[in-house]
Each structure stands twice: as C-alpha cells, then as structure tokens.
Image (cartoon, rainbow, N blue to C red):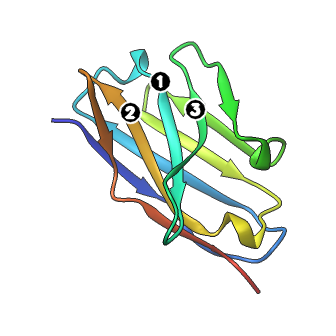
Amino acid sequence: QVYLVESGGGLAQPGGSLRLSCAASGLNFKIYTMKWYRQVPGKERELVANITSSGSTNYIDSVTGRFTISRDNARNTVYLQMHSLKPEDTAVYYCNVRARSTDFWGRGTQVTVGS
C-alpha cells in the first residue's frame, strides 16, 4: 500500500515562507512524478506543482517564482518551498502520486496566510 504523509503547514504572515514535506512509502519513489495540490472549501482541488522522475518541474502561473518543488529520492520525500506567501495561498495542501493506475493522496496539511 502507498502512503503519503504531509507536514510543515501552519500559519504564516503575508510575505512569509513555509516548507511542506511529503514522505512517501510503499512505492519505488524515484520513478514517479510527484505532485502538490491545494484546495479551499467550496472549490475544486487545484494542481500547484509537479516534479518528474528526472527532476523536471511545472507550476501554475500564480505560484511561479514564489514556490519551488523538489525531491530527495534517498529520503522518499518531496518538498514544496513557499516564499512570498499571499492570503490567497491559504488552503489545504495535498501530496499526490499516480502509481499502478491509481491516484494516492495524503491527508493534507493546512496552510493559512494572514496577519
């Protein structure tokens, strides 16, 4: 069974920074594309960033230049470094991997940006 466990969320001031982590188990981590999504109440879950097995990255426009996704294959962990946080970044952030034709999700970590 694949398990994803997010951590690192919390309260940040506008302009501040947070780093999210997602520890994965139950899969050959290094061969999979890993993704970060976020969701606010009443809205659909939104893909924020992904990183391929070769390290290529993609971001949605609203976080480009502020967020960085990275991975540590030795630790089976994917990170999302968030800088210059804005109130509109407030959401529950989820880690995702599609493996064996199945989408696996973590339980999410809350990020709240406010003063």
Instruction: Identify the residue shown where x is 33% and y is 46%.
Output: 105
Whether residues under marks 1 and 2 lie with C-beta atoms below 8 angstroms apart, the answer is yes
Q: CA distance from mark 1 to mark 2?
A: 7 Å
The percent coordinates of residue 88 (x first, y second) are 72, 68
Residue 2 at x, y percent in the picture = 22, 36
Type of amino acid under label 2? Val
Residue closer to the observer: 31 or 38: 38
Taking the image as shown, residue 57 lies to the left or right of residue 47, namely right
The secondary element bearing badge 1 is classed as: loop
Q: Mark 3 and 1 residues: CB-CB less than 8 Å, in contact?
A: yes
Q: Earlier in the sequence, mark 3 or mark 2?
A: 3
* Percent of width and height locating residue 63: 76, 48
Instruction: Point out the tag, 1 or 2, that comes first from the N-terminus.
Output: 1
Q: Amino acid at mark 1?
A: Thr
Looking at the rendering, in which quadrant would you find the N terminus?
top left
Residue appearing at x 30%, y 20% in the figure:
28
What is the residue that sits farthest to the bottom in this orientation? 115
Task: Answer yes or no: is residue 8 visible.
Answer: no
Relative side of 44 to 82, left or right: left
107 relative to 56 in the view: left or right? left
Q: Is residue 48 visible?
A: yes
Q: Which residue is mark 2?
A: 97
Q: Which residue is depicted at the point 50% across and 49% down?
A: 21
The secondary structure type at the circle numbered 2 is strand
Q: Which residue is mark 1?
A: 33
Quick check: 3 left or right of 71?
left
Q: Where is mark 3, residue-wise?
A: 50
In the image, residue 101 sits, relative to residue 47, either above or below, namely above
Residue type at mark 3: give it: Asn
